Image (tube, grey):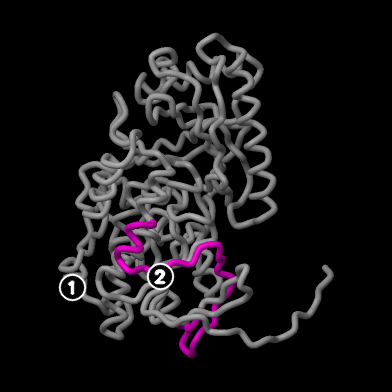
Amino acid sequence: MDFVQEQARRIPVKGTFDVIVAGSGPSGVSAALRAAECGAETLLIEQNGCLGGMWTAGLLGWMIDHDKTESRLLIRLKTELRKRCSAAGSPPCSGSFAFEPECMKLLLEELCEEAGVHLRLYTTVAGTILREGGAIDCVLTESKSGREAWRAKLFLDATGDGDLGALSGASFDAGSSEEGRFQPMSMLAVLTGIRLPEILRYVNGCTPRAEAVGNLHDLLAANGAEPSYHDASLFFLSDELFLLMANHEYRVSGCDADDLTRSAIAARREIHSQIAALRRSGPEWRHLTVACTAERIGVREGRRIRGLYSVSLADLLEGRRQPDAICHVRAGIDVHALNPSFSNGFADHKYKSKPYDIPLRSLISADVPNLILTGRCISGDFYAHASYRVTGNMVPLGEAAGVLAALSARENRPPARIPYERLRQNL
């Protein structure tokens, strides 16, 4: 390989905070809100031009494992969305919660401003500077403003793919233990120009899932657009807004920019081919229109940073309760097939989980003393991750991470030394 030598340079320290959160997806924005509400001077860094991650930039206006929650923030979000959005609430025949991504963008910005969270959008975490002993002193970012440094007492990795942890030298796992492959990516699209009563038999949640996805698959295949995701699904958001998930990009990594580029281009091309096929399929589809495709392809898994405890398949099969529980997960094990020649839908892993707890220990880095994990990059194995990664669980994880960071910063003690009882009192 060819190399160049970059010239050393002085990097300005742009700001100093109690807590810095990298990534503003469902878990990261929740962490920043709770840290600020607990009195910590908090900076939230996001590479997109909006908050919300997969909820907004990814168009995932569909919450799973959201009900029966003790999360006050998640309850507040749903309550506000119902007030503000025409598309908010539980769709017909579904236990999920639907909302308009645009409505979520504005709500999250307003909540962060109200809580006093410092926001920096259009900014990517590009490196770290470590103190003696391995703790993070500063994160380095790249943006239109150039390369900048940001100092804090505590740092939260909410990047989804464990970017901050990896840049800080934290150990991690990635992919399946059997094949070392990642679950496929999927791009989402919001559609309009169709009406629910006319296409009810194709809509997941309004018609039983197996029947709905079978009908949609057969319709696409009959019109020359066999979907790469066998269980292609159409979800109802509002009177004329629908969410389409109908593509899989296999054998690619969310931690590789070339893979992300090729996957996004291929996925968007497939979506538009599918829309053209549906328009040919009958009069009820004649005015079908792509309102938008996601600006970011949906990455199901990246790095899983190693923590003081790793949530395991055994925990799921047993339904294990934890003495330091911060999230009770009811979602099943959702493994999308790793190999397209084996299946175009879900992997046949034969495991059935019971409701289980995620412990606080799985949010504390095993290697970096002042690094807290939240979101899908917390410490767990491949099968556990395939269960807890849904967005309904991301909010309580973020709340716990934010409160832990605020307490740790206030008391000048590592997160591992904050008593669990203190955390519970502040949640």
The residue drawn where x is 30% and y is 84% is 413
Q: Does 48 appear in magenta? A: no
Judge depth for marks 2 and 1 and give the one in front: 2
For mark 1, give the secondary structure: helix
Residue 44 coordinates in the image, percent (x, y): 43, 67
- Between 27 and 320, the residue placed more toward the observer is 27
Q: Is residue 308 left or right of residue 50?
A: left
Residue that badge 1 annotates = 422
Whether 198 is drawn above or below 73: the answer is: above
**Residue 387: x %, y % from top left:** 38, 46
**Residue 119 within the segment the image draws in magenta:** yes
| Most distant residue in the right direction | 2
On screen, residue 379 versus residue 360, left or right, reads right
Query: Which residues lie in the magenta part?
Result: 109-138
Q: Is residue 170 shown above or below 114?
A: below
Q: Looking at this rendering, what residue extends furthest in the bottom direction?
A: 132
Measured as percent of width and height from the top left, residue 249 is found at: 61, 40
> Mark 2 sits on what residue?
118
Q: Is residue 399 left or right of residue 226?
A: left
Q: Quadrant of residue 11?
A: bottom right
Q: Residue at x 33, y 34 (%)?
A: 86
Residue 20, position in %: x, y?
42, 73
How many residues crowd around disc 1 within 10 Å: few (fewer than 14), some, or many (20 or more)?
few
Is 178 or 82 nearer to us in this picture? 82
Which residue is found at the position 47% from the left and 34% from the top?
Answer: 348
The kind of residue tagged 1 is Arg
**Quadrant of residue 96 within the rendered picture:** top left
Q: CA distance from mark 2 to mark 1?
A: 25 Å
Q: Looking at the image, tell me whether mark 2 or mark 1 is earlier in sequence order.
A: 2
Q: Amino acid at mark 2?
A: His
Q: Quadrant of residue 62?
A: top left
Which residue is more in the foreground, 427 or 368?
Answer: 427
